[in-house]
Image: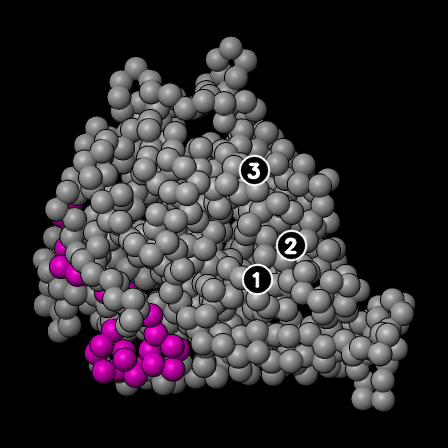
């Protein structure tokens, strides 16, 4: 799989990558399936309340019914493994249509998704090399009836063995895959043997998902085959494509008649791209069955809706400020540093969580979440407008009569891009604008539609912006290089050094988990001194859900990949 996806949301889905997501409003990405919980109205900061899915046995649920939810952005490539398809919201669709080899409990424990992988991978040493054996379910097939066997592993490896500048595949992350020497069939067609050039730990951090051999056949196929077409025949999961409407930006899924596992309970799943301002009215009118309510205003707006249930758990997203170091106004590291020193993250949290009865520890790292014991304080500077001004003065900038610094007759003015029309997005942008001005920097607000998030990231058309990284793994191992390596297509800040790249690419060879964690934190601590990505907060995952919906909702790590065949409506529900 990929490691982390982005939000408004960018999201990666098929390895332990991060997915990207646009953020800052109440429409933050993340929901789930596995894990208990029912009707949570709050979640403890220590992670003790981490699942709110209304967990029910399948026998308690109706057969049939439609579940409709909004998504905040629209992909520019239907290949979720491609850097332009690595959107958190789009990856929610792929959870139902593409193979995922593991299940996760709410606290991050992994187990095999036996419809695909019959047991956890076996790790051995043979002839001095690490050998990992995967045993696949013989019933597992792609929708075009191609067996899901070693050829899928081989295609996934080849598409992720090198960065785009070397291999041509515009993938999300190469961590782990670049360590592979060979992928071959084992003793049976369902056994896959992966031999490593250098060891990689833990081996569950790659091959969390797979691609069809046709998709990995060449860089052209990987980059272009799904650019505008979904190609359901090259996928495999409990649901498959019914319709896509590019005009209304709606994806409708139906049960997959080629699925060999439990029969899906829902007759349809509908994903509709919507602006934030339209989602609450749509929920109250019965047009959608779930929407995020992650701020005070949205909670107030949804009050009184029919059959309302609010489900809350910790979010698996780290919200960050991302700085494009190649933008003219941000090429000078001193300007980026001064902005960091100008930003009061505590004030930003107060604005963001106002009226939500939510407090959390500082997010001083984008590696681990606040409820994980491995998290560390890796921040290079503290909030101080005076220090920001000193940074600029020491770099040769002069403060003008208006309080804005300039150099060579050019004022320090930076573009801050936002997406969507949620009032919280506006409030946060204005807060940042005020803070940065106090540090001597002009901030120009650049407001775009929510659907522009993907194209903006694809073109790197921004100065700095707020976004989120959504996790697909309880370990950040794969996402370290994904987001920080200087040659990674998912390093949207573009900052990095060859020395740090080398250390990041060696992380998988550290077998001791405590040592590996310490090195990851040490690398991030040094990388943050380049001022490309500033951690902000994690926050709660809050959803307004129609009462009666079961086995779906926020559940920490259990929500990364819901088992969509088990999502349904409780018998007797008024809405299904």
Position of 496 with respect to 177 (left or right) is right
How far apart are labels 1 and 3 at the CA level? 21 Å
Q: Which quadrant of the figure contains the C terminus?
A: bottom left
Per the image, label 2 sits on a secondary structure element best described as loop
Q: Position of residue 562 (x, y in %)?
A: 30, 52
Q: Which residue is mark 3?
A: 166
Q: Which quadrant of the figure contains the N terminus?
A: top left
Between 44 and 533, the one nearer to me in the picture: 533
Between 509 and 397, the one nearer to me in the picture: 397
Between 340 and 163, the one nearer to me in the picture: 163
Residue 321: quarter of image: bottom right
Per the image, label 1 sits on a secondary structure element best described as loop
How far apart are labels 2 and 3 at the CA level? 17 Å
Per the image, label 3 sits on a secondary structure element best described as helix
Q: Which residue is mark 1?
A: 460
Identify the residue at image location x=27%, y=43%.
234
Identify the residue at image location x=21%, y=28%.
138
Q: Which residue is mark 2?
A: 494
Q: Nearer the viewer, mark 2 or mark 3?
A: 3
Q: Are marks 2 and 3 in contact (CB under 8 Å)?
A: no
Q: Is residue 559 visible?
A: no
Position of 389 with respect to 107 (left or right) is right
Q: Position of residue 308 (x, y in %)?
A: 26, 76
Q: Residues within 10 Å of mark 3 (few under 14, many from 20)?
A: few
Report the magenta residues as a range.
261-288
């Amino acid at each position: 799989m990929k490691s982390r996806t982005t939000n408004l949301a960018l999201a990666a889905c098929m390895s332990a990558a991060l997915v990207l997501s646009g953020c800052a409003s109440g429409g933050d990405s993340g929901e789930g399936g596995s894990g208990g919980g029912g009707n949570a109205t709050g979640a403890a900061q220590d992670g003790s309340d981490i699942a709110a899915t209304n967990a029910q046995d399948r026998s308690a649920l109706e057969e049939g019914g439609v579940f409709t939810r909004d998504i905040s952005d629209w992909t520019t490539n239907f290949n979720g493994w491609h850097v332009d398809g690595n959107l958190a919201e789009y990856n929610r669709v792929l959870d139902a249509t593409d193979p995922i080899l593991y299940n996760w409990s709410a606290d991050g424990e992994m187990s095999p998704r036996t419809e695909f992988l019959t047991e956890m991978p076996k790790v051995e040493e043979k002839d001095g090399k690490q050998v990992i054996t995967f045993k696949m379910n013989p019933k597992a097939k792609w929708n075009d009836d191609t067996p899901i066997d070693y050829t899928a592993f081989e295609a996934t490896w080849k598409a992720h063995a090198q960065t785009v500048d070397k291999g041509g595949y515009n993938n999300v992350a190469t961590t782990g895959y670049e360590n592979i020497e060979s992928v071959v069939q084992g003793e049976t067609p369902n056994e896959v043997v992966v031999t490593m050039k250098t060891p990689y730990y833990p081996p569950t951090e790659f091959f969390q998902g797979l691609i069809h051999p046709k998709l990995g056949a060449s860089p052209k196929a990987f980059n272009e085959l799904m650019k505008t077409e979904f190609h359901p025949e090259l996928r495999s999961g409990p649901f498959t494509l019914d319709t896509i409407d590019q005009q209304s930006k709606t994806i409708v899924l139906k049960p997959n008649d080629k699925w060999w596992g439990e029969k899906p309970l829902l007759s349809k799943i509908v994903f509709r791209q919507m602006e934030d301002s339209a989602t609450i009215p749509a929920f109250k009118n019965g047009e959608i069955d779930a929407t995020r309510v992650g701020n005070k205003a949205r909670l107030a707006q949804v009050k009184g809706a029919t059959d309302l249930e609010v489900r809350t758990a910790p979010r698996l997203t780290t919200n960050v400020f991302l700085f494009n170091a190649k933008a003219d106004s941000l090429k000078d590291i001193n300007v980026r540093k001064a902005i960091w020193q100008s930003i009061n993250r505590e004030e930003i949290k107060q604005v963001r969580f106002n009226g939500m009865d939510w407090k959390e520890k500082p997010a001083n790292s984008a590696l681990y979440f606040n409820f994980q014991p491995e998290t560390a304080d890796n921040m290079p500077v503290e909030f101080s407008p005076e220090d920001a001004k000193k940074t600029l003065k020491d770099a040769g900038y002069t403060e003008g009569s208006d309080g804005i610094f300039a150099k060579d007759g050019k004022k320090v003015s930076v573009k801050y891009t936002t997406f969507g029309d949620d009032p919280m997005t506006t409030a946060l942008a204005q807060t940042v604008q005020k803070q940065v001005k106090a540090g001597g920097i002009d901030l120009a607000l650049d407001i775009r539609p929510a659907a522009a998030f993907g194209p903006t990231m694809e073109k790197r058309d921004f100065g700095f912006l707020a976004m989120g990284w959504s996790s697909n793994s309880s370990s950040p191992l794969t996402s370290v290089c994904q987001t920080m390596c200087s040659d990674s297509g998912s390093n949207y800040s573009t900052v990095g050094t060859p020395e740090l790249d080398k250390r990041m690419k060696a992380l998988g060879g550290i077998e001791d988990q405590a040592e590996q964690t310490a090195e990851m934190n040490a690398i991030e601590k040094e990388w943050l001194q380049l001022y490309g990505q500033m951690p902000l907060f994690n926050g709660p995952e809050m959803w307004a859900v129609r009462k009666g919906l079961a086995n779906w909702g926020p559940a920490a790590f259990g929500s990364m990949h819901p088992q969509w065949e088990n999502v349904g409506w409780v018998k007797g529900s008024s809405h299904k």
